[in-house]
Image (cartoon, rainbow, N blue to C red):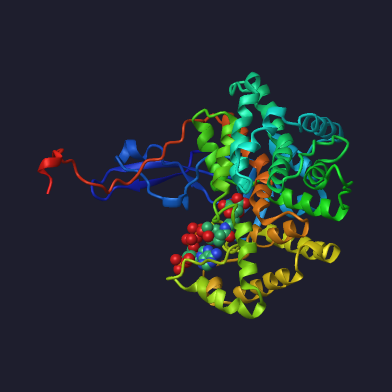
């Protein structure tokens, strides 16, 4: 069967480039333009990579028009209902759901690596007492590479797999340490008799002066949250991880690069910004003025938690999260004022009826409700993006692993449209006007 192609013609010269068309399992076909510069002496131009495929991947697929999300072919709704975060980690890393034996071995491998070197514990004291936890996570994540020199041969699949398990195992410990440092409480060591999520909640909320028993409803709510944040194709932070990895940076440095990108309010920082916004709205009666501001092209205010580069329908994750939110608030209303959830529901209702949002296909995304769940679990707003990173770490490392094994692997180096000055001669300062 001949390879389908498209012909791109430069009408100025009549030259053509025969570009192969790559056919996906799902999603739009892709024009392979790697010979375009050789054939036509031209680049493509796509700021923000709106329609650019950067890599082949078999991990995750989003259907933005249908509002669907699959991990290795499994719909996110089914994984959220039936799976566990560690099982989803296995699926993302190895491509198949584990057998019982495979899962038990993987769970042991992760649990066994959940602690960090004692010297990591001393890193935190270099941060201001009120440092944003993301500024700490960025630092300690990158520093982990200094503890594992013996297993950072990027060309060794055994080292790469070991690093993936270390990242998954240590993220909860680092995240909980960030929180404990921020509130001046002693760090709590991992307890390997607990499950992955229970262990995290125990490291977050137990204290030498009290006993802490994770609430099963809270554990399941957080488990679903982590599953929903695990991976999401080539989003900004994952693309950063891939770009850093393409230069041969060690995987812990790549994770830190992902964490840096996630911190942006347009990306993973949105969940924290949503809570700030809902608190600023204060009452449902104030919603119309905020919607008006979001529509005002002269106002930089945007409805945080709304819109998405890919989803032009409901983000399937926000549907799942909305239900978890509702169930959790019924079960443990203490930590968050139900008013915030009521405002979120009313804001969603009014925005989805507004022509501006309908026309631009702006729907609630994963960040719109996630902050309310985290707040209900007793996790402070400053930790929301850390929690996003806790869930997404497996997606970053799975995409990094896939890239390291990709036959098309090469350093990422985009080109540009140069619009600056033409060549000119240097003028000594005494002769300048
Ligand atoms: C995540 O990529 C991923 O997969 C990300 C993520 C993941 O799991 O990794 O899903 C996680 O980052 C979710 C997004 C969280 N961010 C927010 O909730 C912040 C608020 N949203 C916006 O900043 C925005 O919607 C983005 C950044 C999410 C998407 O930006 P795009 O695709 O570049 O869209 P755009 O800025 O070109 O907007 C198109 C139009 C514009 O209006 P016009 O110029 O056409 O008149 O929609 C408007 C925008 O002004 N618009 C909004 C809006 N989002 C877009 N107007 C008001 N409020 C908003 N939230």
In the displayed structure image, the side of residue 28 where residue 70 appears, left or right: right
Q: Could one spot residue 311 in this view of the protein?
A: no
Between 355 and 375, the residue placed more toward the observer is 375
In the displayed structure image, the side of residue 139 where residue 113 appears, left or right: right
Q: Is residue 40 above or below residue 222?
A: above
Residue 114 at x, y = what percent? Answer: 76, 33
Residue 263 at x, y = what percent? Answer: 57, 49
In the displayed structure image, the side of residue 422 where residue 332 appears, left or right: right
Between 291 and 12, the residue placed more toward the observer is 291
Check the image and name the residue furthest to the bottom: 285
Residue 27 at x, y = what percent? Answer: 57, 51
Residue found 13% across the figure and 45% down from its top: 432
Number of marks in the image? 0
**Res. 34 image quadrant:** top left
Residue found 70% across the figure and 43% down from its top: 181
Residue 31 at x, y = what percent? Answer: 45, 45
Check the image and name the residue furthest to the top: 150
Q: Could one spot residue 229 in this view of the protein?
A: yes
Residue found 80% across the figure and 65% down from its top: 329
Q: Is residue 187 above or below residue 119?
A: below
Q: Is residue 340 above or below residue 257?
A: below
Residue found 80% across the figure and 36% down from its top: 190
């Amino acid at each position: 069967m001949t390879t389908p192609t498209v012909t791109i013609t430069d009408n100025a010269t009549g030259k053509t480039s025969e570009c192969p068309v790559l056919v996906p399992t799902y999603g739009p076909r892709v024009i392979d333009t790697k010979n375009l510069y050789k054939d036509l002496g031209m680049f493509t131009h796509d700021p923000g990579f709106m329609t650019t495929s950067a890599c082949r991947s078999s991990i995750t697929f989003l259907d933005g028009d249908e509002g669907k999300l699959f991990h290795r072919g499994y719909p996110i709704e089914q994984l959220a209902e039936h799976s566990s975060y560690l099982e989803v980690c296995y699926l993302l890393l190895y491509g198949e759901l584990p057998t019982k034996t495979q899962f038990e071995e993987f769970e042991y491998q992760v649990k066994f690596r959940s602690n960090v070197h004692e010297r990591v514990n001393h890193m935190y004291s270099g941060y201001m007492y009120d440092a944003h936890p993301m500024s700490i996570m960025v630092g300690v994540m990158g520093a982990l590479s200094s503890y594992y020199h013996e297993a950072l041969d990027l060309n060794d699949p055994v080292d790469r797999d070991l690093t993936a398990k270390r990242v998954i195992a240590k993220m909860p410990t680092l995240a909980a340490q960030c929180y404990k440092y921020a509130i001046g409480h002693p760090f709590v060591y991992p307890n390997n008799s607990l499950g992955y999520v229970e262990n995290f909640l125990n490291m977050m909320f137990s204290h030498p002066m009290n006993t802490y028993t994770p609430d099963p409803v809270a554990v399941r709510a957080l488990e679903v949250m982590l599953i929903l944040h695990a991976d999401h194709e080539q989003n900004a932070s994952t693309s950063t991880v891939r770009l850093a990895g393409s230069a041969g940076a060690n995987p812990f440095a790549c994770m830190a690069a992902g964490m840096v990108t996630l911190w942006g309010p347009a990306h993973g920082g949105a969940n924290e910004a949503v809570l700030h916004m809902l608190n600023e709205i204060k009452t449902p009666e104030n919603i119309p003025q905020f919607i008006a501001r979001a529509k005002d092209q002269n106002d930089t205010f945007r409805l945080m938690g709304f819109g998405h580069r890919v989803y032009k329908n409901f983000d399937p994750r926000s549907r799942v999260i909305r239900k978890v939110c509702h169930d959790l608030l019924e079960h443990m209303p203490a930590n968050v004022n139900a008013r915030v959830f009521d405002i979120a529901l009313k804001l969603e209702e009014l925005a989805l009826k507004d022509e501006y949002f309908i026309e631009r296909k702006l729907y609630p995304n994963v960040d719109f409700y996630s902050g309310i769940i985290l707040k209900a679990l007793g996790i402070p707003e400053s930790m929301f993006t850390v929690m996003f990173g806790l869930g997404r770490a497996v997606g970053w490392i799975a995409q990094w692993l896939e890239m390291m094994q990709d036959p098309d692997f090469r350093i990422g180096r985009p080109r540009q449209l140069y619009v600056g000055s033409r060549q000119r001669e240097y003028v000594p300062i005494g002769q300048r006007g």
